[in-house]
Amino acid sequence: EKEKEELKKKRQSYQARLMNVKELISKKEGDELALKKELEKIENEGKELDRQENELLKREKKAPWNVDTISKPGFEKTVINKKAPRKAAEDLTEEEREQRMKQFVKENEKLCKQYGMLRKYDDSKRFLQEHLDLVCEETANYLVIWSINLEMEEKHDLMAHVAHQCICMQYILELAKQLDVDPRACVSSFFSKIQQCVPEYRQQFESEIEGFKGRIQKRAQEKLQEAMAQLEEEEKQERMGPGGLDPADVFESLPEELKACFESRDIELLQKTIATMPVDQAKYHMKRCVDSG
């Protein structure tokens, strides 16, 4: 922050001097040769300022959410009422994680949806500060699942909105990991910084959201395909005959002359057709027909 402020002052001084010299030259006041030399000197200073500002910007872009850029001002270190520490997620079995998630959703689903529907950063900040128990991995996981379900229901705009809220939560959790603090201590800092950040930070944030939405859309499509495949399999199982064959599959495998018999439901034609076929083929197809029901 100090370096940025110093560069800002240098830039203001540079612009004032540049305008002054250019004005003197245009009015032909003073020693023209000396003024042109001064102008060249000032322009070189401007190039150096450009270099310093670009260098600062590059450094900031490499660590946009670190301690220096996020935790000041207003980083809450002592305002959290400590609860008994929960067992770390990585120490839980799959069954324990699933049970914890179920319990969390049972107790907090309404609040998670309220947070997911908020639109203004200030409202989100205030809501999370009033419900600090929501600042956790379970909320982020719930919002991911909700986003997928909304996309599957073709509620694309609502999915995009919930995805934004999900990324906010994930940024808070990631910031807490970087700082090695309770995630609840990072709420105010995150929302303050995301509203005040330079365009490059905002672009990174928006890029994260777009990438997340793309992954949600892909997963929703996969789940729809899985659901369709499961439905087709269930329908196939329901069609299965006593011999375990699917009537539709058996019908498609029949010779055209036998298909015509079944389509017309002509028993006499069926008997004549079978009589004209080789015995082994006739037995094979008729057995499959019986097994498929």
Image: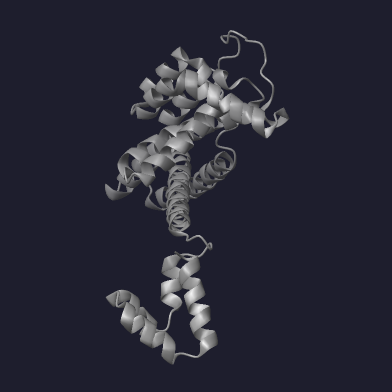
Image quadrant assignment for residue 98: top right
Q: Kindly identify the residue that appears in the image at 29 percent across and 78 percent down.
A: 266
- Numbered disc total: 0
Residue nearest the observer in this picture, 111 or 163: 111
Q: Where is residue 175 shown, x and y percent of the image?
A: 58, 29
Task: Residue 24: give x, y in percent of width and height.
Answer: 32, 44
Q: Is residue 201 visible?
A: yes
Please state, as top left, top right, bottom left or bottom right, where the N terminus lies in the image: top right
Q: Is residue 210 above or below residue 140?
A: below
Residue 57 coordinates in the image, percent (x, y): 53, 42
Tell me: residue 203, above or below residue 70.
Answer: below
**Furthest-right residue in view?**
91
Image side of residue 16 versus residue 144, left or right: left
Residue 107 as seen in the image, left or right of residue 85: left
* Viewer-nearest residue: 265 or 61: 265
**Residue 180: image x %, image y %?**
67, 25
Q: Which color mode does the image show? A: one colour
Residue drawn at point x = 51 percent, y = 31 percent = 140
Residue in front for this viewpoint, 188 or 269: 269
Residue at 38 percent of width and 48 percent of height: 31
Q: Identify which residue, 77 or 60, lies in the foreground.
A: 77
Above or below, 151 relative to 75? below
The answer to whether residue 197 of the structure is visible from this angle is no
- Name the quadrant containing residue 60: top right
Q: Is residue 74 above or below residue 279?
A: above
**Quadrant of the snapshot with the C terminus:** bottom left
User: What residue is drawn where x is 37% and y is 51%?
Assistant: 32
